[in-house]
Image (cartoon, coloured by chain):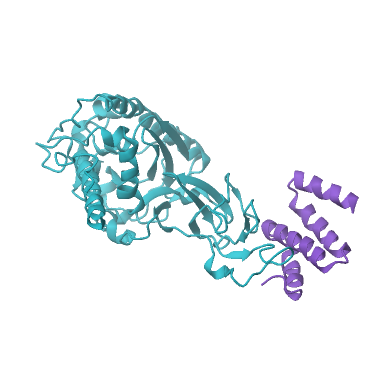
């Protein structure tokens, strides 16, 4: 996770939305805690929305299924 | 009961007796604030041109008389104007012109909006990892859209939302220029330029109203378009400007000219007209091109003029466009010392607003009378509300 944190910070510094979507999805998938996983998933979804990325519908569906998004 | 800031009674009389608008309307921030309400926010005013956002997703933040607005072309190609703030904490959403690829994400807490203004996500609003909360009704929290209307690519806005419909307010002018209600095509980057002026916005309009100054300020123009070739356009309470009987088409080195707008009557063979959509949009029409100048007040003594040239076809000669832009830029630049000089003159305490030539200053007087009428109407409404 430390390596993931480093990569996240670098992606934030570069405002690289595509990478941010990937890394936050990776963090969500790696977490065993539901709330922590959803926290990361929310970020992945928001960056996907901002970028108009193809992952946005799937991320939205995951959050809806988890009762975290409309 | 508060007293009016200025006395406009000497403005609202016949031109042979009238004075111009008093100094305070050019140099006093309190009057500038009053004019914002009386002349801009409650009326239709020019904001920009749609060509400023040519592609879907293009967004341009505009500080319009201190109000943060966002000019945006949505994903379906419609041009919209929003208040450039998040409905959560009022944060500015877009700081620089840019392309919105997907959603507009507020940089503060990342509430996201579609390009149509719909609130589409509210991250962590119900707590970490929870994007919903019973009290946050997204349908009620879209971006605040500003009423807008586009005529010939010019984006007009009515900030208050209370003005009569655009087509009603400008009905007579639109009828006069109905032949120009046709598709127009911006010439592109080589067909726009800007002036940043040390003047109150009204002096730019006033100078545009009249042809009286042409032989003195624009001697080059006067060589073929003399003072006596011009006529006044005077519609009290509505609009004013000037026209010419001797518009001459620009020719490229090979003798080619711009294509004409379709189906124009003979009047426009050598005719050109130059009218202001009060308060702040100066437009010129000729058989083969139109220009638009959006006059944007920046402060009481600072004004920006954004100039745009439009043609009858999306395909025009680059060299001819450059020549045309250069010619107009030279003409408009010749006016800079005048509008800035009159502004400095407004600091002379004993200036009474000036006296008009009844023969030559009619269009300017009509603008002054319009300004004074709107301000007095606003003052009367404010007084009635006390």
Question: Image height check: is B262 above or below B133?
Answer: above
Instruction: Indicate the quadrant where residue B105 lies.
Output: bottom right
- Which colour represents chain B? cyan
The one nearer the camera, A6 or A17, is A6
Residue B180 x/y as whole percent? 34, 53
- Which colour represents chain A? purple
Instruction: Indicate the quadrant where residue A34 lies.
Output: bottom right
The one nearer the camera, B263 or B80, is B80
Residue B167 x/y as whole percent? 31, 60
How many marks do you count on the picture? 0
**Residue B284 appears anywhere in the view:** no
Residue B142 x/y as whole percent? 54, 64
**Residue B342 appears anywhere in the view:** yes
Question: Image height check: is B344 above or below A65?
Answer: above
Quarter in which the C terminus of chain A is drawn = bottom right
The one nearer the camera, B80 or B144, is B144
For the point 19% across and 35% down, which residue is it? Answer: B20
């Amino acid at each position: 996770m430390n390596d993931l944190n480093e990569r996240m910070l670098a992606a934030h510094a570069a405002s690289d939305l595509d990478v941010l979507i990937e890394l936050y999805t990776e963090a969500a998938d790696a977490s065993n805690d539901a709330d922590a996983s959803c926290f990361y998933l929310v970020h992945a979804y928001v960056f996907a929305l901002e970028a108009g990325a193809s992952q946005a519908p799937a991320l939205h569906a995951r959050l809806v299924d988890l009762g975290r998004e409309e | 009961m508060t007293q009016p800031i200025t006395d406009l009674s000497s403005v609202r009389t016949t031109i042979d007796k009238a004075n111009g608008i008093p100094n305070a309307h050019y140099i006093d921030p309190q009057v500038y604030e009053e004019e914002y309400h009386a002349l801009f926010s409650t009326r239709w005013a020019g904001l920009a041109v749609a060509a400023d956002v040519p592609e879907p997703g293009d967004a341009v933040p505009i500080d319009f008389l201190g109000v943060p607005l966002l000019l945006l072309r949505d994903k379906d190609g419609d041009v919209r104007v929003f208040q450039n703030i998040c409905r959560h904490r009022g944060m500015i959403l877009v700081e620089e012109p840019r392309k919105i690829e997907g959603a507009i994400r507020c940089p503060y807490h990342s509430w996201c909006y579609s390009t149509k203004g719909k609130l589409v996500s509210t991250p962590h609003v119900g707590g970490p990892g929870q994007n919903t909360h019973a009290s946050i009704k997204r349908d009620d929290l879209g971006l605040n859209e500003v009423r807008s209307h586009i005529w010939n690519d010019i984006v007009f806005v009515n900030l208050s939302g209370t003005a009569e419909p655009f087509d009603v307010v400008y009905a007579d002018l639109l009828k006069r220029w109905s032949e120009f209600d046709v598709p127009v095509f911006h010439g592109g980057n080589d067909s726009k330029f800007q002036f940043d002026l040390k003047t109150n916005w009204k002096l730019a309009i006033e100078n545009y109203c009249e042809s009286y100054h042409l032989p003195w300020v624009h001697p080059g123009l006067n060589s073929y378009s003399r003072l006596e070739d011009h006529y006044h356009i005077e519609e009290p309470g509505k609009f004013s400007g000037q026209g010419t009987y001797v518009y001459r088409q620009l020719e490229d080195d090979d003798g080619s000219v711009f294509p004409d707008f379709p189906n124009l009557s003979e009047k426009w063979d050598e005719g050109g007209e130059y009218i202001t959509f009060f308060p702040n949009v100066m437009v010129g029409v000729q058989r083969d091109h139109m220009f638009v100048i959006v006059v944007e007040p920046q402060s009481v003594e600072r004004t920006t003029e954004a100039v745009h040239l439009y043609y009858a076809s999306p395909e025009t000669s680059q060299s001819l466009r450059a020549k045309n832009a250069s010619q107009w830029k030279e003409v408009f630049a010749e006016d800079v010392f005048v509008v800035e000089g009159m502004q400095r003159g407004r600091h002379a305490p004993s200036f009474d607003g000036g006296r008009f030539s009844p023969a030559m200053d009619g269009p300017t007087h009509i603008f002054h009378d319009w300004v004074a009428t709107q301000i007095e109407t606003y003052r009367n409404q404010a007084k009635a509300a006390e």
